[in-house]
Amino acid sequence: MKKLLLLSVCLISFYITSGQSDKDQITETLLHYIEGTANGAPERIKKAFHKDLNLYSISNDTLSIRSGKKYISYFKEGKKRERVGKIVSIDVVNDAAIAKVEIDVPTRKRLYTDYMMLLKVKGTWKIIHKSYTHINY
């Protein structure tokens, strides 16, 4: 019975994603990240990130590297943050993609620009790399 249930779930999942274009699936993945970080939904962020993802930025002219797991730990279930995200662009070829996302944090007067690399892993788009920077306004 468990095998039948698992098979049914897999087929339903395949059916749902097979009707979507790669760009639609990437958009969905990016929205998990954007909405998960804004709404305090760490499970959504986990859904977007590959388990081995690292985040890269420059701090005081030095490369700063943070694990995705550490980043996700900053977001607590149900604790919303003042973040407004938008997808600026998506470029996809076969099973690889790059996306540009902007996150506005008006309370800090800061605009983040995220460059995300994504790969289609076992039929699911995952963010495998995030490089980011910010400007103050």
Image (tube, rainbow, N blue to C red):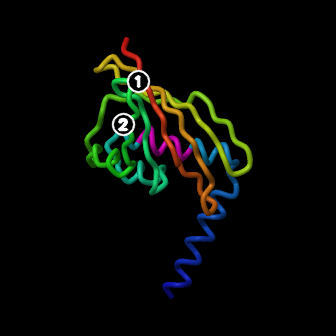
Residue to which mark 1 is pinned? 104
Q: Residue at x 39, y 41 (%)?
A: 65
Q: Mark 2 vs mark 1: which is more N-terminal?
A: 2
Q: Circle 1 — which element?
A: strand
Q: CA distance from mark 2 to mark 1?
A: 10 Å
Q: Relative to 135, is 25 on the left or the right? A: right
Q: Circle 2 — which element?
A: helix
Numbered badge on residue 38:
2
Q: Residue at x 54, y 51 (%)?
A: 126
Q: Relative to 64, is 11 on the left or the right? A: right
Name the amino acid, label 2. Answer: Ala
Q: Nearer the viewer, residue 127 or 35?
A: 127
Is 31 in the magenta? yes
- Locate the C terminus and report the quarter of the image it occupies: top left
Residue 127, horizontal then vertical, whole percent: 52, 47
Q: Residue at x 61, y 51 (%)?
A: 119
